[in-house]
Amino acid sequence: MKYLNKILVISTALLTVNACTNYVDFEPSETHEIVAGVYFQSKGDYEAILTGCYDPLQWLYLNTLIGDIATGNSLCGGESATDVIGLQQIDDYTHNPNNDNLTSIWQWCYEGVNRVNYLEENKAKLDFEGKDAIYGQAYFLRAYYYFELVKFFGDVPLFTERRLDGTDSGTLQRTSKEEVYAQIENDLLEAVNSLPTTQNQAGRINKYAAQALLGKVYLFQDKFQEAASMLQNVIGVYSLVPDYESQFLKSGENGPESVFEIQYSNESEWYDWGCPTCGEGNFGIIHNGPRAYSGPQFASGWSFNVPTAALYNSFDEGDTRRDASILNIVAFSEETGASYAEGYEHTGYFNRKYIPRAGESGAQTELNYLTNYRAIRYADVLLMAAEANARGNINEDLARQYLNQVRERAFGNSDHNISSSGTALVQAIWAERNLELSMEGHHFFDLVRTGQAATEIEGFVSGKHDVFPVPQREIDISGLTQNPQY
């Protein structure tokens, strides 16, 4: 489905700044209060606001880029060492609280929270058929935004009953991540209990997506029994597509492996470089392409997030995921005659999963790619279930079964199946996650939650880099405390 930005006028309560410059601290808007006073008179009003709650999902491209740039999977790249300096700093582990990219993540996730809370404020105004399902979707979305916030920043301000207004400035406090996780779990349990198993529109949250995200939330807290039980509900509902690469093509969107997919469109007429995320297109895609590209299949990009040779070489011979995940531009150019310009930190590789593809953008090429983001794939569910069963000493046979389902799809046979147990099995599952999900934005958070980051990431300091710094703007305005060593 398309997430309608026009809903912004109503759903972003108390904003007086540019609609795409959204902060946790707000100023009261008399105009907004007049609109809100006459709204929520029909089911359609609630549905429209719900659509606005989905909208910030489209803005979170930085979350995905950072998930690999902050690891050895990829380098920042770009045009030069100062091109998008916030990402360069994260790549080099020199980032600090004055980082525009981290500030954007904070702002955009809280914008999503605030929109859901607008629905929460007005929940009692009207009863109608299907209301529980609307709120189930909203609670999933709030859980998703808070999950991103707690992954990036740890303890964060938690508010659920209402939107923030001008009186909240300077009064916010950080809530422990344990309490934030508890709220995330509560929201997802509400979603599981109220959502249908299927939706009639692509991109809408269903019960299985809520169960998958809840299982992931449990896994991030080492709640292995709960994770295994919750993820088991999703096992068998979806299936692995036979051709790994096909699911990342336009024809493979919302396919049998897609549990939760963020929708984009290239039909938006909005293109404004003052707010590149305000349209319906996927702004993240342009970052991943070769510079000055000329040739078949692909299109030019900005050469960010370039995979490393170490990642490319980590795939075993015969693993079909290597060339489906990573474009070897040298080999491809020799084969097809394509040309390109080398960018900063050029490795010879590009993110093929989320690369600009010819003919898939709209009016303003850079801003309007239609590529959906596969936020939760069935292979991810299988590997999370495998990890929960193995680390929780629940069922190693089941863990190997789920792990080997993923490997058999990758190699086309069972010759590479894993038979290990104990610590070796857990290590194999962790390694498989990076092979299966490489360049999809998960790796940094997997390394942190499993305690591997300090040994796997150059420059990573335990006790500091487990989370990112709270944006300095929030420190200055709201008086929040900063994360250690920043």
Image (cartoon, grey):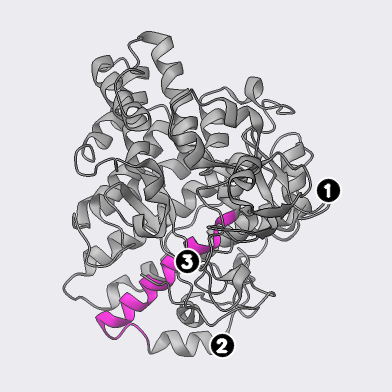
Q: Nearer the viewer, residue 271 or 445?
A: 271
Identify the image quadrant of the N terminus.
bottom left
Q: Which of marks 1 and 3 is nearer the N terminus?
A: 1
Identify the image quadrant of the C terminus.
top right
Residue depicted at 32% across the width and 17% down the height:
415
Residue depicted at 42% across the width and 49% down the height:
375
Q: Is residue 380 magenta?
A: no
Residue 93: which quarter of the image? top right
Q: Residue 370 carries which label?
A: 3
The furthest residue to the left: 129
Per the model, the C-alpha gap separating discs 1 and 3 is 29 Å
Circle 1 SS class: loop
Q: Residue 81 carries which label?
A: 1
Instruction: Give how far across and how far down residue 398 sits, in percent.
Output: 24, 21
Circle 3 SS class: loop
Amino acid type shown at disc 3: Leu
Q: Which of marks 2 and 1 is nearer the N terminus?
A: 2
Instruction: Give how far across and how far down residue 438 sits, in percent.
Output: 51, 37
Magenta stretch: give its range.
39-61
Image-based side of 409 in relation to 430, left or right: left
Per the model, the C-alpha gap separating discs 2 and 1 is 45 Å
Amino acid type shown at disc 2: Glu
